[in-house]
């Protein structure tokens, strides 16, 4: 078992030193939420990172949301399907004012999606909505979406936050000054590390504070400089905070999918035998228990089994180092001629630690692993450009199974999609194409389940685990519910009991 990288005794000493200096700052009516990184874009038409998406859900309403089985459910609007290619949406009768006082209407919905669909605007969401042929606002509360082809999953595509049409026309900078109709409104952004919102129903202020270093973020929580945080802490630090009587911890099973990705154009990782050997070489249970602090569960597919399109009968890949060595021998490798792989990861300390453990487990079966870590921008740029043999990443916030098209179809090589490893499989393409054109959800599910069994054999990704979501807050913070996808919607119900004296 690897020793913790954080000196927990030193952390306790530092916490005592910080508490005194922090007490003067505790008199505040704001709820303060600690983030590992600031949101990259507060314009929902362009945002793609998880933090932006979670905060934008607070600022903007959307037509459709998802239930616990990831099935689309009404949010701003109900809908009816008039034909296989014609959907009519009805805004709910209760008026939804934007934060500038104007009322959200069908024209605003149309303007938002027309903007995304216009190629001149370069929205990253345009490709996912290419099935839309035209949008017609029938009156103030209803509008029609007409599609190029049948798509039973279509309502689940309409999750972009709605912005006012008149501000779109005026080229309003939504990233700098968001105007939505969600439960929270924008107040200020003093700098790139701080964002101030106000909860509409009771005028309570919320401050989102970016603190990249996890130890510093934990110290600020212990000292009362922030009230709560979610995820992005090493397990040993989470365990330390659990023992602090001033704090409380909530956990729920998550759906963020961690995996190893490969280049199929590489002479080593392009071999199915090598990828299968890697899959058998990883002791997921040991890592989950001793490194992740039991805050994860083994993954078998990109979709979790509770998803309506999940393959519930897939079995975990067993840890079997002898089988892994046998597969490498079949691939032509030996101790005198080992497989050599460059493994890329980010420079986050915990991700480096995980990568080092995976490196060791692969070396034990005879794969020589050269581990290279980079700052996030460089690392992610290399992955998107296909400059890798092997890498580790996670898919966050997946809702609809069309992610398989985006990630694994042979036509989804960047920039058209996220098939970054250049995986080509006529069987996978056929399953995806049949699922795409299937007439109903039951038929789609059959094709998606078959696809997931095929991917479990082909291994374009080696599945690792689904990490839990962990919410840690000051003892007086109440009312937050941890979501399965890690969103921050629970902040709408957060309240504060009488705090202890600092």
Image (spheres, helix red, strand yellow):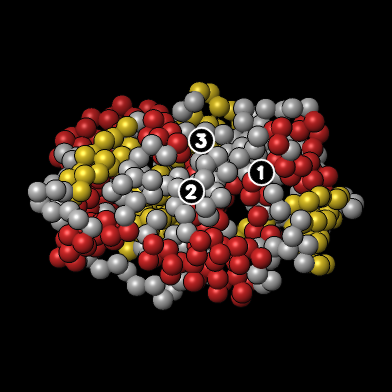
Q: Which disc is residue 419 wearing? A: 2
Q: Which residue is mark 1?
A: 126
Circles 2 and 1: CB atoms closer than 8 Å: no
The C terminus sits in image quarter: top left
Q: Which disc is residue 206 wearing? A: none
At horizontal 56% and vertical 50% (from top left) the residue drawn is: 411
At horizontal 51% and vertical 35% (from top left) the residue drawn is: 39
Which tag, 2 or 1, sits closer to the chain's start? 1
Residue 252 at x, y = what percent? Answer: 40, 61
Q: Horizontally, is 14 left or right of 58 in the view? A: left
Which tag, 2 or 3, sits closer to the chain's start? 3
Residue 253 at x, y = what percent? Answer: 40, 62
- Judge by depth and name the residue closer to the eye, 179 or 377: 377
Q: Which residue is mark 3?
A: 39
Label 3 SS: loop
Residue 15 at x, y = what percent? Answer: 24, 35
Cα gap from disc 2 to disc 1, whole angstroms: 17 Å
């Amino acid at each position: 078992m690897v020793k913790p990288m954080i000196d927990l005794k030193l952390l306790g000493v530092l916490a005592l030193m910080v508490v005194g200096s922090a007490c003067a700052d505790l008199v505040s009516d704001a709820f303060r939420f600690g983030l590992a990184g600031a949101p990259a874009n507060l314009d929902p038409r362009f945002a793609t990172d998880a933090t932006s998406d979670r905060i934008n859900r607070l600022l903007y309403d959307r037509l459709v949301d998802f239930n616990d089985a990831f099935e689309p459910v009404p949010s701003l609007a109900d809908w009816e399907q008039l034909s296989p290619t014609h959907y009519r949406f009805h805004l709910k009768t209760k008026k939804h004012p934007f934060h500038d006082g104007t009322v959200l209407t069908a024209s605003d919905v149309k303007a938002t999606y027309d903007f995304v669909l216009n190629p001149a605007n370069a929205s990253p969401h345009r490709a996912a909505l290419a099935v839309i042929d035209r949008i017609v606002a029938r009156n103030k509360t209803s509008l029609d979406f007409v599609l190029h082809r049948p798509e039973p999953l279509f309502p689940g595509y309409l999750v972009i936050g709605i912005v006012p049409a008149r501000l779109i026309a005026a080229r309003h900078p939504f990233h700098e000054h968001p105007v939505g109709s969600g439960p929270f409104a924008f107040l200020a952004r003093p700098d790139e590390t701080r964002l101030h919102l106000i909860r509409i129903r009771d005028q309570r202020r919320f401050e989102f504070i970016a603190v990249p270093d996890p130890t510093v973020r934990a110290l600020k929580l212990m000292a009362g400089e922030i009230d709560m945080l979610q995820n992005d802490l090493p397990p040993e630090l989470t365990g330390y905070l659990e023992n602090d009587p001033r704090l409380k911890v909530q956990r729920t099973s998550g759906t963020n999918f961690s995996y190893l990705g490969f280049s199929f154009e590489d002479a080593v990782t392009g071999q199915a035998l090598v990828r299968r050997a890697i899959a058998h070489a990883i002791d997921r249970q040991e890592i989950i228990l001793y490194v992740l602090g039991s805050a994860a569960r083994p993954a078998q597919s990109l979709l979790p089994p509770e998803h309506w399109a999940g393959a519930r009968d897939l079995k975990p890949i067993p840890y079997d180092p002898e089988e892994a060595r046998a597969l490498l021998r079949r691939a032509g490798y030996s101790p005198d001629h080992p497989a050599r792989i460059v493994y890329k990861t980010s420079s986050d300390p915990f991700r480096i630690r995980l990568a080092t453990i995976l490196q060791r487990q692969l070396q034990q079966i005879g794969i020589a692993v050269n581990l290279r870590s980079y700052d996030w921008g460089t690392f992610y740029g290399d992955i998107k450009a296909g400059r890798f043999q092997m890498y580790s990443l996670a898919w966050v916030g997946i809702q609809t199974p069309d992610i398989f098209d985006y990630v694994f179809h042979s036509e989804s090589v960047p920039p058209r999609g996220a098939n970054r490893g250049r995986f080509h499989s006529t069987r996978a393409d056929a399953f995806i194409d049949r699922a795409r054109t299937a007439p109903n959800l039951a038929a789609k599910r059959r094709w998606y389940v078959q696809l997931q069994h095929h991917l479990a054999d082909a291994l374009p990704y080696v599945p690792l685990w689904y990490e839990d979501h962990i919410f840690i807050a000051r003892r007086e913070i109440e009312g937050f519910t941890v979501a399965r996808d890690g969103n921050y919607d629970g902040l709408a119900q957060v309240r504060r009991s009488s705090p202890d004296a600092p």
